[in-house]
């Protein structure tokens, strides 16, 4: 169980420290942690946000626990040197194409959701976001039009094999849940989405037990706040998945509670909280580490098959929340280390 630990920037090192403490508390003798540099701190030390040495560590490990990257002090850099290129580079280099983002309301947090308690209580869904295609990786740039105006452009595209493999992930996930899959696209205006929908329908024939539905992304955003209980598994593209999963985080009370997994076709996976580096609160003991701790639980489950240990971590987080352990993002006063202590005590 060799795990790369890439803490990154801002609050990344703070929340990752608490997740590492939880992993170590499980007493797994085969667990080996290897640290590496990513993001702005890597650029400052090595001249690149994803140095060759970090990539070597990633390839040599079975899983990656990733903190966060991002630093306003790097906004002047060329795009390929900005901190965010570390996570994009790892996704591309390791073939991490499937992003799993569960969203479930913890009991007792209904009043913290942006939704009415009776609506928020319904939320128990999984968003599966394709990670290696779409406008994030398409041709992009700024060009000068004949009349002298500047024009920015980003190419959105998906090949059918890219859609097919993420569709299989969605259907398999639905088979392990309530057997309902909603494919989100914008097929009424985008040819990319029309291909997406056509291929998902083709794949559905291999999963006759799963009920497949389709929804335009604008309607999906509305339905997430109107009736989130209707969703079991959502599968969608890179751009739409990025937006909808962040929206889902506020439906359950805080982005500081949502973990994620990025999986390849092999065994390696990258696990990270969906929140950013939050440089404005870095070093102030204000960050909620629960999302990162829950990401560590996903790491144990998906990369190593340690279901019992993953459930223990999730139960410890739920118990801490039920006992009133709340970070500042949840209206409480518990600091990063104090939350980590509380989870460890219940573990």
Image (cartoon, rainbow, N blue to C red):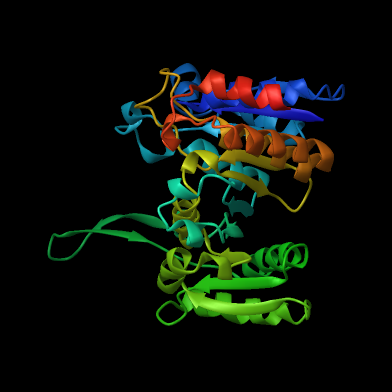
Q: Do we see residue 232 in this rendering?
A: yes
* Quadrant where the image shows the N terminus: top right
* Quadrant where the image shows the C terminus: top right
**Furthest residue in direction right, as rendered:** 29
Q: What residue is at 58 percent from the left and 72 percent from the top?
A: 183
Asked whether 346 or 225 is in front, the reply is: 346
User: Looking at the image, is 340 positioned above or below residue 201?
Assistant: above
Q: What residue is at 50 percent from the left and 23 percent from the top?
A: 42
Determine whether, in the image, residue 242 is placed left or right of residue 235.
left
x, y percent for residue 139: 43, 58
The answer to which quarter of the image holds residue 116 is: bottom left
Q: Do we see residue 137 in this rendering?
A: no
x, y percent for residue 334: 48, 23
Question: Tag count in the figure?
Answer: 0
x, y percent for residue 344: 68, 23
User: Looking at the image, is 162 positioned above or below residue 23?
Assistant: below
Asked whether 176 or 118 is in front, the reply is: 118
Q: What residue is at 59 percent from the left and 72 percent from the top?
A: 182
Asked whether 337 or 324 is in front, the reply is: 324
User: Looking at the image, is 94 positioned above or below residue 13?
Assistant: below
The answer to which quarter of the image holds residue 82 is: top left
**Furthest residue in direction left, as rendered:** 147
x, y percent for residue 260: 61, 45
The answer to which quarter of the image holds residue 267 is: top right
Q: What residue is at 54 percent from the left and 32 percent from the top?
A: 324
């Amino acid at each position: 169980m060799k795990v790369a630990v890439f803490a990154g920037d801002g609050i990344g090192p703070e929340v990752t420290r608490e997740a590492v403490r939880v992993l170590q508390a499980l007493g797994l003798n085969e667990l080996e942690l290897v640290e590496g540099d990513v993001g702005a701190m890597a650029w400052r030390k090595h001249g690149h946000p994803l140095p060759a040495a970090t990539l070597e560590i990633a390839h040599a490990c079975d899983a990656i626990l990733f903190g966060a990257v991002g630093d306003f002090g790097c906004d002047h850099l060329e795009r390929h040197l900005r901190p965010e290129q570390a996570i994009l580079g790892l996704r591309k280099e390791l073939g991490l194409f499937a992003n799993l983002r569960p969203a479930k309301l913890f009991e007792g947090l209904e009043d913290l959701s942006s939704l009415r308690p009776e609506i928020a209580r319904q939320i128990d869904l999984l968003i599966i976001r394709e990670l290696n295609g779409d406008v994030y990786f398409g041709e992009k740039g700024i060009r000068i039009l004949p009349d002298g105006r500047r024009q920015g452009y980003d190419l959105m595209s998906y090949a059918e094999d890219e859609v097919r493999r993420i569709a299989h992930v969605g259907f398999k996930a639905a088979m392990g849940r309530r057997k309902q899959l909603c494919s989100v696209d914008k097929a009424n205006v985008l040819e990319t989405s029309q291909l997406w929908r056509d291929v998902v329908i083709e794949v559905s024939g291999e999963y006759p037990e799963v009920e497949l539905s389709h929804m335009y992304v604008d309607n999906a955003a509305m339905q997430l706040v109107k009736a989130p209980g209707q969703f079991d598994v959502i599968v969608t593209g890179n751009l739409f998945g990025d937006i909808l999963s962040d929206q889902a985080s506020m439906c359950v009370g805080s982005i500081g509670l949502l973990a994620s997994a990025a999986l390849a076709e092999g065994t390696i996976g990258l696990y990270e909280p969906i929140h950013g580096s939050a440089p404005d609160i870095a070093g102030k003991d204000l960050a909620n580490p629960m999302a990162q701790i829950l990401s560590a639980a996903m790491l144990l489950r998906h990369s190593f098959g340690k279901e019992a240990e993953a459930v223990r971590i999730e139960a410890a987080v739920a118990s801490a929340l039920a006992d009133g352990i709340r970070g500042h993002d949840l209206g409480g006063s518990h600091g990063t280390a104090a939350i980590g202590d509380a989870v460890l005590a219940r573990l």
